[in-house]
Image (cartoon, rainbow, N blue to C red):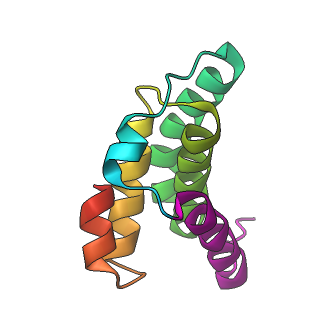
Amino acid sequence: QKKAASKFTIIREYIRVKKLLQNKTAEDIANLPELDDERYEMGQRMNEHLAVSIYHVEPTMLPLIIFQLVTTSLKHGLSPTSSPGFAGLGLLLCGPFGKPHEGREMA
């Protein structure tokens, strides 16, 4: 049986990402170091593939995958999977979170 992500969980994770992004400009994010840990890189790739599938099966889980991609990028460095993560965050901010100005900055 499928289990939807609760609104509370989504908001909690959004707040965590928001704290990590606090006072960071798009330029600050672009200048983050490269991700150099194979384990995190593999996790990022798995999350990227999972995001595509989860959208069709349980869409409420998609924000959690996006938040995980962004969190790992901010904490451990940028990788090719960082772009879809930040674009996904921009999509969430422009849509469900109703913050189009912030969303455009992320995308």
> Which image quarter holds the C terminus?
bottom left
Residue 60 lies, in percent from the top left, at 56, 70
Residue 40 lies, in percent from the top left, at 66, 26
- Asked if residue 84 shows in the view, the reply is no
**Which residue corresponds to the image point at 54% horizontal and 64% vertical from the top-left?**
22
**Which residue corresponds to the image point at 56% horizontal and 67% vertical from the top-left?**
18
**Which residue corresponds to the image point at 37% horizontal and 55% vertical from the top-left?**
25
Q: Quadrant of residue 14?
A: bottom right
> Which image quarter holds the N terminus?
bottom right
Residue in front for this viewpoint, 89 or 65:
89
Residue 36 lies, in percent from the top left, at 60, 15
For residue 95, above or below residue 46: below
**Which residue corresponds to the image point at 39% horizontal and 34% vertical from the top-left?**
31
For residue 71, above or below residue 33: below
Left or right: where does residue 101 sit relative to residue 76?
left
For residue 7, above or below residue 30: below
For the record, the magenta segment spans 1-22
Please tell me whether the stretch drawn in magenta is mainly helix, strand or loop: helix
Q: Quadrant of residue 2?
A: bottom right
Left or right: where does residue 83 sit relative to residue 77?
left
Left or right: where does residue 62 sit relative to residue 12?
left
